[in-house]
Image (cartoon, rainbow, N blue to C red):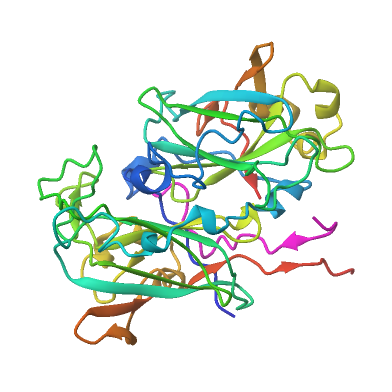
Amino acid sequence: MSEGRKLNPRDWRTQPDQAHAAYKSTRLRSQRQPLVPLAEAHTELAAPVFGDGAVAAADSDLTRNAVRNGEPIGERIVVAGRLLDEGGIPIPRALVELWQANAAGRYAHAQDMHDAPLDPNFLGTGRTLTDERGRYRFVTVRPGAYPWLNHHNAWRPAHIHFSVFGTAFAQRLVTQMYFPGDPLLGLDPIFNSTADPHARRRLVSAFSQGLTEPQRALGYEFNIVLRGPLATPMED
Amino acid sequence: MPGQTPSQTVGPFFSEALTPAEAGAGAPGWCLAAEDAPGAAICIRGMLLDGAGDPVCDGMVEIWQADAEGRFPDGTGSFPGFGRSATDEAGEFRFRTIKPGPVSPGSAPHISAAVFARGMLNHAFTRIYFSDESAANARDAVLLAVEPERRETLIAHKEKDGAEPAYRFTIRLQGEAETVFFDA
């Protein structure tokens, strides 16, 4: 790691407040002490490198990676986009992982108590590496909305969880992708935990005719922007 | 210039994707150190606790570290340097890894950690230092920049000596002894 490598700071105007009263689970899990600046960050400016061994080609097609006796139920979709830094520079060979509920709004997870059917042919997890131009692509089904216990009649808007790595561990990001035009977005405390409406809009995918496959699947574009770029500090 | 994508909580249902019980070869898991990995194998266990002191049973801890020589793995060797552990019903996470070497002159051996859970809208970065490195810890720039009374929250305590030492590292998300988290 070269001396003097430096990362743009996290832009807290674009990030959620850690304590967000409308999202009840933050009450006992949010930090109360201010974050401490790292005096040196050699470790956080390096990052794990995931090779082809971390993913199989089938891992990016959620309509096929858990098939037992048929195809998963639901509206088939393509979700694709680019992983970039703030300078617009693509991040190649980066691990992108996702997970989601099935078309009925139920996760294949032992703790999901929602009274909606499991789909024997859908696990709802996928992983891939970005290509040389920072692009990723998944095929899946559109997840359903589901209720949760945060407040009376609370429903999460349809969403897909994303986990991504950059070229510095400090760029690590876990986020959620939403769908355009969802009436639940305005009511969702997690989506609205970021105060800045422009930043929030970056969580909403865009319908893409270009990604849409004839006779096959609607396409949604979701680009992910990590803090950065890595810069050498200016002398002043 | 595009702006940063906001973080969102990992939620309660990540484990099938991020910490599956049967992680395939090459997928990150809690065991970073194969039997033949060069360096001293160590075990790190700990609890993730919320502001009431209750265990967080649906959280995840990720670690990233240098190898025994203080070099960051580049994906070509057998030591990945990166691991993940979901917390169990007792709020416990665990790792088997290699004790890292110092990554720069004057820095104490440490592991970087990111903590995720339902109810955390951003993950939180901390560092794991070692109780049996007190001389190096006393010179480490990151530790020295932390208020003295809070440094203790960054120290993993050796609870078992021997061929494979075990350390305990408690992470408190909130409360009187809240762990130091960094604006990494």
- Looking at the rendering, which quadrant does residue A33 occupy? top right
Quadrant placement of the C terminus of chain A: bottom right
Using the rendered image of the protein, determine whether residue A234 is visible from the camera's viewpoint.
yes
Please tell me which residue lies in front, A169 or B77.
Answer: B77
Q: Residue at x 56, y 63 (%)?
A: A94
Q: Is residue B182 left or right of residue B57?
A: right
Front-most of residues B110 and A69: A69
Q: Is residue A229 magenta?
A: no
Relative vertical location of residue B110 with respect to residue A8 in this rendering, above or below: above
- Dominant SS type (magenta): loop
Residue at image point 20% right, 70% down: A183
Q: Position of residue A189 (x, y in %)?
A: 31, 56
In the figure, is residue A154 to the left or right of B38?
left
Q: Name the residue rendered at 86%, 31% in the picture.
A: B139
Left or right of A144 in this view: A228 = right
Q: Position of residue A51 (x, y in %)?
A: 57, 57
Q: Magenta residues? A: A1-20
Nearer the observer, A164 or A148: A164
Question: Residue, x 28% and y 59% (percent of image)?
Answer: A188
Placement of B46 over or under A174, stated as above or below = above
* Residue A222 in sight in this render: no
